[in-house]
């Protein structure tokens, strides 16, 4: 899940309030008996894109609500919040306890308040990212087991922290976020009273900077230092030597002293986090450091089989093997390929063979066959925009060179496995935050600027095929 406007106003602080108004409307419309029977045990588990995800304790309830009341709930959500266009009903073991009590006791109301606050600060969880949906193989078995240990012990009433912190690391698209969400789901489902915050390092920084700017850091400190489980995703984005790192360090130490569970993910091991202070790096390495390794052919095939089954798509084994062999970069791309193939199959209504896949996925397959280097990207982009290659490294900030430079950084992030600091270094020793900024900017512009979008497509094609650019 990307940073799609969460923490902003649309889906932010009011969401729990909106939810409670919707409950009130359901009670008014259907009467107290129906309400008690069907709606009381519902709980808002999160927002997934445009969908409100609502948990109920049993399959029966889920099916019944799905059939009879979902449309109504959806309409109420729409009326409350235009950003929410859909409702998903899921089975959620914590629903019965976490649902609204008849008469909220003051203590419970306070707990719910704190919980709402945490869910607001934290990022929403993807309902698909559970342990059950995670395919285990040699490359990720250790990380999976470590994650499960943490989740099981934190969810159990007699909680003893098995190891602290748990540090998961590995390349892009290999399942780190999936495992993080799976831990959070299991704890929320089995022990909803645990206070858990899950968010990205970037969001942590944003919240802290905002609190600093508003001169109001107490609530921030208090919230983060009183949780039972703190989970920070993409830790490599924690900034340079600024106060955020300092703040995180203190939070970290306090939680460790209190024996609260900390789970962190990053794209490299603690010792290689170039932007992180030495004292923090060494503390991160104290606990359990678990590596999610690149996938093997067997794991990729297993993942494809499991996803095809979930999508109720009968695809020939030969095709799955072909994909597992050719698309090796990461699981996200593997999933993307599968989705496209299944969509195509449904559209044309004939069996999908390897040959058809080659037609449907030329870009993915070609890309898999070619490795692109940063130097090459810089060269092609400079050619395309007719600027000097040295301007990729220079400090000149004129738009005519700055924009192509940003395009090149964006393509490096997209098409190579290089980290942000490594990319920054190749662009005249720029900071990784400059690269983040460039990537964001180009993503934004791409959506509104047709010429730029075309430029990007052309450049990508040139780089993927290794063809020479236009003369
Ligand atoms: P990361 O955070 O490491 O970049 P993600 O956790 O976002 O990667 O995973 C990318 C996609 O691949 C997600 O849709 C995730 O569900 C899927 N995925 C990754 N590993 C597995 C796995 N072992 N089993 C099932 N799905 C996986
Ligand atoms: Mg991730």
Image (cartoon, rainbow, N blue to C red):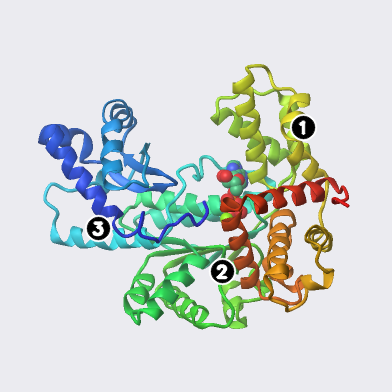
The residue shown at (57%, 72%) is 284
Mark sitting earlier along the chain (2/1)? 2
Report which residue position mark 2 lands on.
287
- Residue 222 on image: x %, y %: 33, 75
Of marks 2 and 3, the one in the foreground: 3
In the shown orientation, is residue 468 left or right of residue 31?
right
Q: Is residue 232 above or below residue 216?
A: above
143 vs 15, nearest the viewer: 15
Report which residue position mark 3 lands on.
112
Q: Quadrant of residue 391?
A: bottom right
Marker count (numbered): 3
Q: Is residue 294 visible?
A: no
Q: Is residue 245 visible?
A: yes
Report which residue position mark 1 lands on.
322
Q: Is residue 38 above or below residue 250?
A: above
Mark sitting earlier along the chain (3/1)? 3
């Amino acid at each position: 899940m990307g940073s799609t406007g969460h923490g902003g106003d649309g889906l932010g602080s009011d969401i729990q309030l909106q939810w409670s108004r919707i409950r009130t409307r359901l009670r008014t419309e259907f009467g107290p008996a129906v309400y008690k029977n069907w709606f009381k045990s519902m709980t808002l588990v999160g927002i997934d894109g445009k969908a409100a995800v609502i948990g109920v304790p049993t399959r029966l309830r889920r099916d019944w609500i799905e059939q009879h009341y979902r449309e109504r709930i959806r309409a109420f959500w729409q009326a409350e919040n235009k950003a929410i266009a859909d409702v998903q009903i899921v089975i959620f073991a914590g629903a019965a306890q976490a649902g609204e009590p008849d008469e909220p006791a003051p203590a419970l109301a306070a707990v719910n308040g704190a919980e709402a606050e945490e869910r607001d600060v934290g990022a929403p969880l993807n309902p698909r990212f559970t342990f059950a949906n995670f395919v285990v193989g040699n490359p990720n078995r250790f990380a999976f087991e470590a994650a499960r240990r943490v989740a099981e012990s934190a969810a159990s009433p007699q909680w003893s922290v098995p190891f602290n912190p748990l540090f998961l690391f590995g390349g892009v698209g290999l399942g780190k976020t999936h495992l993080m969400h799976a831990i959070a789901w299991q704890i929320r489902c089995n022990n909803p009273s645990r206070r858990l915050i899950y968010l990205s390092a970037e969001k942590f920084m944003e919240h802290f900077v905002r609190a600093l700017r508003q001169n109001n850091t107490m609530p921030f400190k208090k919230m983060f230092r009183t949780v039972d489980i703190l989970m920070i995703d993409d830790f490599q984005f924690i900034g340079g030597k600024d106060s955020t790192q300092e703040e995180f360090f203190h939070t970290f130490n306090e939680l460790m002293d209190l024996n609260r569970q900390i789970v962190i993910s990053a794209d490299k091991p603690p010792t290689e986090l170039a932007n992180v202070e030495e004292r923090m790096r060494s503390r991160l390495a104290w606990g359990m450091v678990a590596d999610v390794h690149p996938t093997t052919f067997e794991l990729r095939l297993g993942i494809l089989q499991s996803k095809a089954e979930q999508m109720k798509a009968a695809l020939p084994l030969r095709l799955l093997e072909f994909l597992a062999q050719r698309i090796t970069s990461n699981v996200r791309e593997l999933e993307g390929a599968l989705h496209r193939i299944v969509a195509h199959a449904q559209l044309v209504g004939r069996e999908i063979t390897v040959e058809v896949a080659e037609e449907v996925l030329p870009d993915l397959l070609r890309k898999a066959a070619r490795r692109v280097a940063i130097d090459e990207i810089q060269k092609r982009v400079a050619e395309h925009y007719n600027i000097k290659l040295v301007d990729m490294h220079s400090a000149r900030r004129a738009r005519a060179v700055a924009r192509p430079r940003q395009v090149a950084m964006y393509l490096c992030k997209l098409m190579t496995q290089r980290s942000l600091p490594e990319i920054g270094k190749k662009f005249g020793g720029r900071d990784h935050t400059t690269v983040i900024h460039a990537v964001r900017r180009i993503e934004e512009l791409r959506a509104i600027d047709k010429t730029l979008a075309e430029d990007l497509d052309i450049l990508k094609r040139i780089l993927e095929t290794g063809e020479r650019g236009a003369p």
